[in-house]
Amino acid sequence: MSSLLEVRGLSKEFSAGGMMRRARLHAVDDVSFALEPGRITALAGESGSGKSTVARLLARLYDPTAGAVLFEGRDVAADRSRSNVLRYRSKVQMIFQDPFASLNPTKTVRAHLERPLRIHGLAARHDVEARVHELLETVGLVPPFAVAAKYPHQLSGGQRQRVSIARALAVEPRVLIADEPISMLDVSIRVGILNLMRDLKDRGIAFLYVTHDLASARYVADDILVMYAGQVVEQGPVDEVLANPLHPYTRLLISSIPDGTGPLQQIEIRKGTASAAVDPRPGCRFVDRCPLAIDVCRRETPELVEARPAQAARCHVTAPPTTHGEDVHAESAS
Amino acid sequence: MIADLTVSTTVDEQQLVRPLVQIEDLVIDYATRSRTTRAVDGVSLAIGTGEIVGLAGESGCGKSTLANAVMQLVRPPARIAGGRILFQGEDLVGKSPEELRRFRWRNVSMVFQSAMNALNPVMRVGDQFVDMMRAHERVSKRDAIRTAGELLELVGIDRRRINAYPHELSGGMRQRVIIAMALALRPELMIMDEPTTALDVVVQREILQQVRALQREFGFAVLFITHDLSLLLELANRVAIMYAGEIVEVAPAGAIRDGARHPYTEGLLRSFPPLTRPVERLTGIPGSPPDLAAPPSGCRFHTRCPHCLADRPALYARQTGERPVLREVAPGHWVACHLVEEQG
């Protein structure tokens, strides 16, 4: 079965270090997942975990060092013709973090939405206005004729982000990649954008929601991938992963989040290097901060192992290769 | 592994008899040639000795301006247009620059969101401690360096890092250096304005735990400002909610968590998706915060309030025409809302 957008063994390395010492930063290391229509997948992690690099690889802003991005079953890197790139760019749209920087201050909302319609030839001249209004209504900007005439500076941050989303929707994409779309917005209007994402999902769009905020991931997403130092360390249904995390890093992340349900609880936080993805040695990249580490963790890089149904983790201790998930793979392979 | 750090969330009545800081009816204007914006409009708030007070609100509500006023850092085009700020009974408004210079760091210190970028990039961390301490106290360089090392250890940084330059430290470590500097002269109050907003959640957690432990050890008071109400509900003894230049609700953290009364506070609480509790569709708050150059008449929240409806004409007239004032609805729990007042 082929998914709408599938990522296989995706890796991206950057040069790091100075003149004297060449080093390679493994920003994204062997990441695989699939996006399905009508599902939201959260890609979570802290700054430097590689989550934004994955988003940029999917948007074709970078070329991968290794691995493939398959759209509707075809490797997008294979055909670099202009028509193919244009088609991919219209079917896979990106929503950025900063709604202040991503809109042109000298253009009206109408101009922002008309442009992609014209470039991709998606509406006849006499249909453009009706389509613009329809897009604005879809993202909750009403009355559309009034909003269409406005300039970005006349809109609030939340309204601007809705315009960015409307612009992404203009080209009738099948996949939306939203990179921290609410982190620059005021608290009271974030929920509105999250609700809009939930509504768009119901229209059959496949969503990748890149975020550092696990609570919002739980609110909108169906599945979650947790990244640490370039690798996916845990993945599965979001409710399962957050209620019963396997990986010690996921556990640390969850217990660090203020939930406002009671006074601050003291948790143990171990020190560790933040540059684990630079010239990584074999072994688990979380080992220095891990309360569960055993000998093997320093020697061998753990694989993603499905330790519970649909829930996998990269951990020798909580998801060892002998658990039932591995058996399932062995059987299906034979 | 998990130690309970629960403290009483009720305010010590003794402390409030004469609080450490008493802000009274404070008004701060930003005046430009074309218009005047009232960023803080008649705010009163007390901070008790050793108390952690949380101040929550959205961007532009005036919370940072209020913090700057306590630190006496209000500069043109902003100016204090009215009210008093009493620190241990003495009014800070009108103090001379020299008096204020001695007051800052010694009595009140401040940690900003971008404080980690305020370190001098070409000076070693230890030398920056020495400079700051010797500007306030007669202390030898050797003693200052020794104190700096002790303070760094307190915030979880190896004292050998005293010889490091800021760029050699991560953002979280630099922010902890600033917190250590803020502690150096044993101030009675530390103002923390979004001190962890730019940091990752695990680093934020580490810093909050350290602040809490240090606060218990040294007994300083904290005014903690953030847009993250969930964080305040865990950290603060009392929480004040600010909207459009006014404080609309003040109560012990537990009372805000379990029994918030102001519709804006209720809306804020409904804006945070839960991490563990069941997920329901959240509503947030419709609309967006008002322009303070032309704030709405009456209750400033009435344009977004779900309880401001024309079908109750008498109440509606008050909501849209009369400014509500803070009234005590339960011991220590103050709310500025016409609806709450009518409900009693």
Image (cartoon, rainbow, N blue to C red):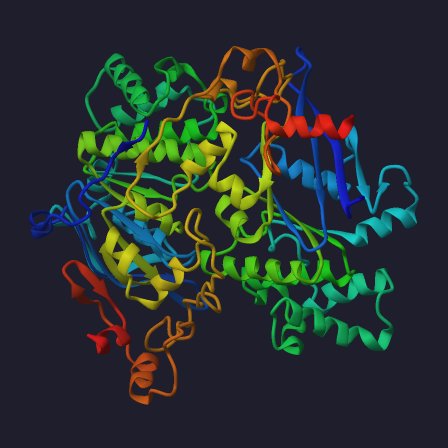
In the rendered image of this protein, does residue B117 appear above or below residue A299? below
Q: Position of residue A106 (x, y in %)?
A: 68, 62
Asked whether residue B116 is in view, the answer is no
Rendered residue at 65%/75% (across/down): A144
Asked whether residue A166 is in view, the answer is yes
Q: Horizontal placement of A126 versus B63: left or right?
A: right
Q: Horizontal placement of B90 versus A177: left or right?
A: left
Rendered residue at 14%/60% (across/down): B331
Q: Nearer the viewer, residue B62 or A56?
A: A56
Rendered residue at 72%/42% (across/down): A34
Q: Position of residue B274 (x, y in %)?
A: 43, 51
Quarter of the image where the C terminus of chain B is located: bottom left
Q: Position of residue A265 (x, y in %)?
A: 31, 36
The image quadrant of residue B104 is top left
Quarter of the image where the N terminus of chain B is located: top left
Q: Nearer the viewer, residue A72 or B98?
A: A72
In the rendered image of this protein, does residue A4 appear above or below residue B125? below
Q: Horizontal placement of A179 versus B111: left or right?
A: right
Q: Position of residue A154 (x, y in %)?
A: 58, 67
Q: Horizontal placement of B55 versus A236: left or right?
A: left
In the rendered image of this protein, does residue B215 appear above or below residue A116? above
In the rendered image of this protein, does residue B271 appear above or below residue A151? above
Q: Nearer the viewer, residue B333 or B130?
A: B333
In this rendering, the count of numbered labels is 0
